[in-house]
Amino acid sequence: MIRLRDLLHETNYDRIDKLPPGKLFDDAKNIKDIFKMSHHTWSEVIEAFEKNQETVQPVNINISDIRITQPNIRINKVKQIIANINTMTPINAVQFTDGEIAIYDGHHRLVANWALDKQTIDVNLVKLNQPKYDASGVDTPGDPTK
């Protein structure tokens, strides 16, 4: 019998195991050194997403353009997501007026995609300003007056 884990590249799991140790959980990993932390607080992200969620636009965004708001990740949850990556739903994020895209929900899914060497991820994006990404996920120019 072939297990799904055997079908996945073992290096994907190895990549997760090599993340720096976390502080909150025995099996947590600290991802601050891999993804940039948001300049916006978790409360700001929650409030912005929930207040404006009717404006959500699904887009495909570069993983490197997304800022994390949760510094610790449970490794076992990431490995479970990797094993079920084809059923993954988009992460939820907010694009603030300064252009930063910060995660509201989906840190484990983001790390799982990163571990699989994916460059982009599907995002339900709430935009609070001139979007960096249009509805097709294409990078758009910023305000030429700035």
Image (spheres, rainbow, N blue to C red):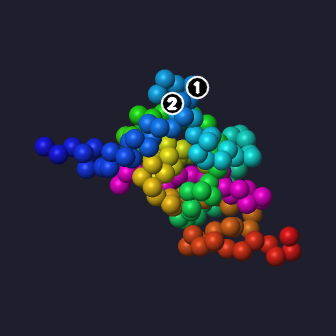
**Disc 2: which residue:** 28
**Disc 1: which residue:** 23
Report the front residue among 113 and 15: 15
Side of 131 relative to 125 (left or right)? right
Q: Amino acid at mark 2?
A: Ala
Q: Earlier in the sequence, mark 2 or mark 1?
A: 1
Residue at the spot x=50%, y=46% of the render? Answer: 111
For the C terminus, give its image quadrant: bottom right
Question: Which element carries disc 1, helix, strand or loop?
Answer: loop
Q: Say whether residue 122 is visible.
A: no
For the N terminus, give its image quadrant: top left
Q: Callout 1: 10 Å neighbours few (<14), some, many (20+)?
A: few
71 to 106, vertically: above or below: above
Residue at the spot x=33%, y=45% of the render? Answer: 10
56 to 7, vertically: above or below: below
7 to 76, vertically: above or below: below
Report the front residue among 129 and 77: 77
Location of residue 94 by image quarter? bottom right
Location of residue 56 by image quarter? bottom right
Q: Which residues are magenta?
A: 84-102
In the image, residue 114 lies at what x, y percent? 49, 51
In the image, residue 143 lies at what x, y percent? 80, 72
Location of residue 126 by image quarter? bottom right
Q: How many marks?
A: 2
Q: Say whether residue 100 is visible.
A: yes
Question: Which element carries disc 2, helix, strand or loop?
Answer: strand
